[in-house]
Image: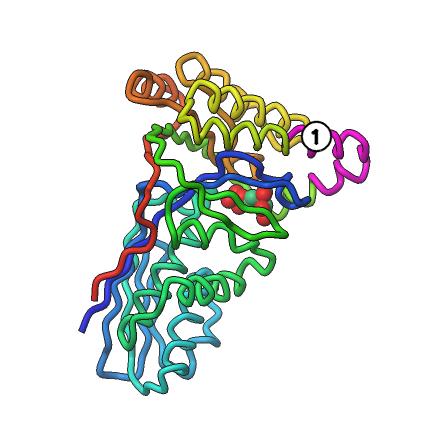
Amino acid sequence: MKSVASAPGKVILFGEHFVVYGVKAILCSIDKRITVTSKLADNNSIKIESSLGKIEANVDSITKLKDPSAVLMKPLIYIVTKTLEKFKKNVGVEIKIESEIPAGIGLGSSSACCVAAAASVTGLFEKLKREEILKFAIEAERTIFQNTSGADCSVCTYGGIMEYDKKNGFKKINSNIDLGLVIANSAQPHFTSELVNRVREFRENNEDLFVSLCEQESYLIQKALSALEDRDLHTLGKLMSENQSFLERIGVSTQKLAFLIEEAKKTAYGAKITGAGGGGCVIALTDKTNLNNTLTRLGKHVDCFSARIDYKGLLDTF
Ligand code: PMV
C-alpha cells in the first residue's frame, strides 16, 4: 500500500518581520510542490529518503540518531513515530520526498514537507481532516523551529492567499487574482532567527520610528487587501516596493537584494524581499506582459524562476 500527498511552497507578499509585532501579513502558496510517498515495510525500520540525505534505522532507535541528515529530518522522524504510536502499529515505514522547492531559501520547503508528510504517513492508516493534518504538521515543525507561527504550514495546507496575524491566526483571502511572480534566489544564506533578533535590536534602539513603521505597514496592508480584491496589479506592485523600503529601514536588506530589486522594478510592477531577508529570495510581481523580460533580466545575475499562486493546497491520493 502506498500513500502519496503533496503540498505547495509559499512566499510572503507583505508584512514579514512586522508580523512578529502584531501587524498583519499576507502570504500565498506557489505552484511548486513537495511530494511525499509513504509505504508500509515488512521489517520494523523507518527509511527516509530526500535530497537532504537518506536515513534508515529501527523504529525504537531512530530518534537517537545523531548524524546531520537525521537532525534535519527530525520533523519527519516525529511524524512517522507519532503516527505509529497513534494508530498502535508495529510496522516499518518507508518515505520518499521529492521537491520542486529549493530548500533553505524561505520558500516554505520545510512547512510544505511537514504538511505533505503528515498527510502521506497518516494516510497509510486513516484519512485525517485537513485541520488535523495542519495541527500535526505544526507540531512536527516545532521540533526544529520552536517559535514557528504556523502561518507557513497553514498556507501550505489550504493554498491560495491568506492574511495572518498573531492574535487572530489566518484567514483566507477570496481573491482569484492571476499574478505572475518571478522568484530570484540571491544565493546569500539567510538565517531567520538571526534576522528576527536584529530587528528586535533595531526596535529597542529606535522605538518611535519602529512604532511609526508598524503603523505605516498596517495601512499599506489594508491598501494591499483592497488591491487584491480589485485585482489591481499596478497598485499591488507599488505597495510591494513600498513595503521593501520599510524592510530596508529596519536593516534586513543587503546590497545584492537591493540591486536585484532595482533591476526587477525596471520591468515588473514591483519587487521586494520575501521572508526574513539578509539573503534568501526576492519576488517581483508581473503578469504575462512582463514576466518573461523580468525573468531574463534577473536571470542574468542569479538563479530565478517564475511561479503562480497555487489555489489547491494539500493534495492527497491514497
Ligand atoms: O524567511 P522565512 O520564511 O523564514 O520568513 C520569516 C518571516 C518573519 O516574519 C521574518 C519571521 C516570522 O516568524 O514571522
Query: 69 or 292: which is nearer to us?
Result: 292
Quarter of the image containing the C terminus?
A: bottom left
Residue 189 placement (x, y as % from top left):
51, 39
- The reply, left or right, for residue 235 in relation to residue 313 is right
Instruction: Give the magenta-colored segment's residue range.
Output: 199-217
Query: 168 or 37: which is nearer to us?
Result: 168
Q: Is residue 203 magenta?
A: yes
Query: 65 or 85: which is nearer to us?
Result: 85
Residue 86 placement (x, y as % from top left):
40, 81
Residue 227 visible somewhere in the drawing: yes
- The reply, left or right, for residue 121 in relation to residue 317 is right
**Magenta region, mostly helix, strand or loop?**
helix
Residue 39 placement (x, y as % from top left):
23, 72
- The quarter of the image that holds ligand 1 is top right
Answer above or below: position of 135 versus 177.
Answer: below
SS state under label 1? helix
Furthest toward the left, the residue is 1
Quarter of the image containing the N terminus?
A: bottom left
Label 1 beta carbon within 8 A of ligand 1: no
Q: Where does label 1 land, which residue?
A: 213
The residue depicted at 35 percent of the width and 48 percent of the height is 8
- Quarter of the image for residue 173 reads top left
Answer above or below: position of 238 versus 2.
Answer: above
Q: Please, which colouring scheme is shown?
A: rainbow
The residue depicted at 21 percent of the width and 62 percent of the height is 317
Residue 267 placement (x, y as % from top left):
39, 14
Residue type at the position of mark 1: Leu
The residue depicted at 26 percent of the width and 74 percent of the height is 124
- The reply, left or right, for residue 275 in relation to residue 85 is right
